[in-house]
Amino acid sequence: MSKTKGATTTAKAAKKAAIGTANGKAANGKAANGKAANEKVLNKKVAMSQAIEARQPSSMDDFLFDLRGYIIIENAIEPQLLDELNAIFDQIPRTLEFGEWLGNSQRRDYNKMTGMELHNAIELGAPFEALVDHPSWINYARHYCGEEKSYVEGLFIDESLASFRKSGGLHPVHSGGYRGALRGKYHYEHGLFRAGQCNVLLALCDIGPGDGATMVIPGSHKSNLPHPGTGDYFKGDKMDTLEGAIEVHLNKGDALLFVDGLMHGGSNRTTREGERRVVIYRYGPVWGASRFGYQYSTELLNRVTPEQRKILEPVPPCTPQNSFIPTEAPGNKTPEAPEK
Ligand SMILES: O=C(O)CCC(=O)C(=O)O
């Protein structure tokens, strides 16, 4: 399996930030229960460094992304950031119930087989914020799904999650080119990529055989016909033996970047001990909307860098109370005023 090679590292100033706090409410309308453990996670201060130089997609990356629908970015994140993300995973209470909030993140498993999935994970703290425009993949996202060279160039993250998967967990196959939603569709035209959505799945642990590796059917983002063996997503049919599907094994710190329109899912985890830990950020065009209605907190938006804010809030709200002509916002370059 061809992988994108690691980049040289340079030292940069350490950045400190507090984990975001927000007043989330549970799905059933109850206020978040403010358990002591949750408070502890949210108030922890973390230190981290940005130490990886920006990577650019090569012509081989483009070729493979077009051909297969995915590429692997090896050693995508700094060891320190990896440790910090794992430290937060360690602290997240496993007692969190479906629908329960942890600050402005909410447990919302995709289905009963996937295991615990915390959505709006960007709000889980500074290490998660560092992933928003991480230099290892942000230029890939811009290139493949950022409406490059158009009047609405840029990115928006419409879904982010921290996923824990134990023995027995899996994610049935979904997506694919056949009757795919525009949101995840793969498109290439006139020398430009126009994917609807690209996912970055970051491995926080080694994921090998038996560990519940992500599975893909290479090339299926372009398929015109349904796969006859797909099965029933809602019945939890495993994709482990699905014809054409392969496991993508990752080392701790590697990232799998794939177009959402690729047939993909998670193999059945048979390893008894431990858990599979991944973070998934879904990038798409600036005109996208949060899939599940999560709102980035004002604290988060005020805390992140201007570049990160452009990804979390590419088109700031414009109201009579907060009126401005957003010349900077995508798609809003104002023409010269006509001469009087
Ligand atoms: O859990 C996995 O490995 C697959 C993730 C997935 O299905 C998705 O990103 O939609």
Image (tube, grey):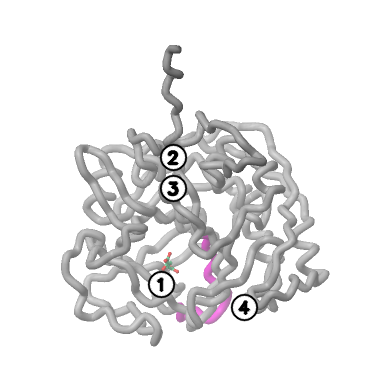
Look at the image and say whether residue 191 sits in the magenta stretch.
Answer: no
Q: Label for residue 98?
A: 4
Q: Which residue is mark 1?
A: 266
User: Where on the picture, by quarter, is residue 310?
Assistant: top right
Instruction: Find residue 319 and report its horizontal and vertical position in percent.
Output: 60, 43
Q: What's the magenta region?
A: 269-279
Q: Secondary structure at mark 4?
A: loop
Proximity of marks 4 and 3: CB atoms separated by less than 8 Å? no
User: Where on the picture, by quarter, is residue 91?
Assistant: bottom right
The residue lying toward the viewer, choosing from 78 and 226, is 226
Q: Determine whether 315 is above or below 334 in the image.
A: below
Residue extending furthest toward the right: 36
User: Where on the picture, by quarter, is residue 116?
Assistant: bottom right
Does residue 133 appear anywhere in the picture? no
Q: What whole-number distance in Å separates the C-alpha atoms at marks 3 and 2?
A: 9 Å
Q: Label for residue 87?
A: none
**What's the residue type where badge 2 is placed?**
Gly
The residue lying toward the viewer, choosing from 245 and 175, is 175
Q: What whole-number distance in Å separates the C-alpha atoms at marks 2 and 4?
A: 33 Å
Q: Label for residue 154?
A: 2
Q: What whole-number distance in Å separates the C-alpha atoms at marks 2 and 1?
A: 29 Å
